[in-house]
């Protein structure tokens, strides 16, 4: 069986939900607060702030690193209905990358599995 070379995961987490989700993935990951510039393609996992906004720390990171962004995922809370995980929509549209996942809070086994399936598809698309 061929081992897939998954891209780096860069994440932003305020309450710990995104950090917990990323930890469940078992992939190489770094927090936006710990790195100013990345040197390799990555997938961003962030949260939706306030009522449907991209967090400032995520925006700042993307200003310096948007050129290497391959895809985006966002956490949210379904009680916000139409703005649930909308940060993924905003970033996807602005940078022209696919949405890998939208998940509630820290996600569950099903959302982790779906995320990994989408990551596998992304790797296969990149490598042909």
Image: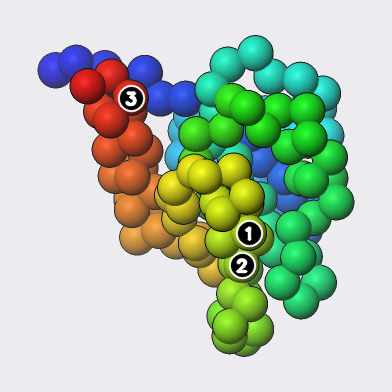
Q: Is residue 106 visible?
A: no
Q: Which residue is mark 1?
A: 90
- In screen coordinates, is 82 left or right of 12? left
Q: Which residue occupies 76% across, 45% down? A: 58
Q: Secondary structure at mark 1?
A: helix
- For the residue pair 26 and 55, the one nearer the viewer reads as 55
Residue 52 position, x and y percent, is 72, 72
Q: Quadrant of the N terminus?
A: top left
- In screen coordinates, is 44 left or right of 7? right
Q: Which residue occupies 66% across, 46% down? A: 19
How is the protein colored in the picture?
rainbow
Quarter of the rendering containing residue 40? top right
Q: Which residue is mark 3?
A: 126
User: Alpha-carbon neighbours of circle 1 within 10 Å: few (<14), some, or many (≥20)?
Assistant: some
Q: Which residue occupies 55% across, 28% down? A: 42
Q: Is residue 65 above or below residue 40?
A: below
**Is the C-beta separation of discs 1 and 2 under 8 Å?**
yes
- In screen coordinates, is 107 left or right of 39? left
Q: CA distance from mark 1 to mark 2?
A: 6 Å
Q: Is residue 14 above or below residue 116?
A: below
**Is the C-beta separation of discs 1 and 3 under 8 Å?**
no
Q: Earlier in the sequence, mark 3 or mark 2?
A: 2
Residue 63 position, x and y percent, is 78, 35
Residue 101 position, x and y percent, is 45, 55
Q: Quadrant of the C terminus?
A: top left
Q: Secondary structure at mark 3?
A: helix
In the picture, the disc for residue 86 is 2
Q: CA distance from mark 1 to mark 3?
A: 23 Å
Q: Which residue occupies 28% across, 38% down? A: 121
Residue 112 position, x and y percent, is 41, 51
């Amino acid at each position: 069986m061929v081992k897939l070379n998954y891209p780096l995961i860069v994440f932003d987490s305020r309450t710990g939900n995104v950090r917990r989700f990323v930890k469940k993935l078992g992939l190489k990951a770094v927090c936006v607060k710990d790195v100013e510039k990345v040197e390799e393609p990555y997938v961003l996992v962030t949260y939706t702030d306030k009522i449907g906004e991209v967090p400032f720390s995520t925006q700042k990171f993307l200003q310096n690193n948007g050129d290497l962004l391959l895809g985006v995922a966002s956490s949210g809370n379904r009680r916000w209905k139409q703005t649930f995980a909308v940060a993924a929509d905003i970033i996807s549209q602005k940078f022209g990358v696919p949405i890998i996942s939208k998940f509630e809070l820290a996600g569950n086994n099903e959302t982790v599995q779906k995320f990994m399936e989408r990551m596998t598809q992304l790797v296969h698309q990149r490598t042909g």
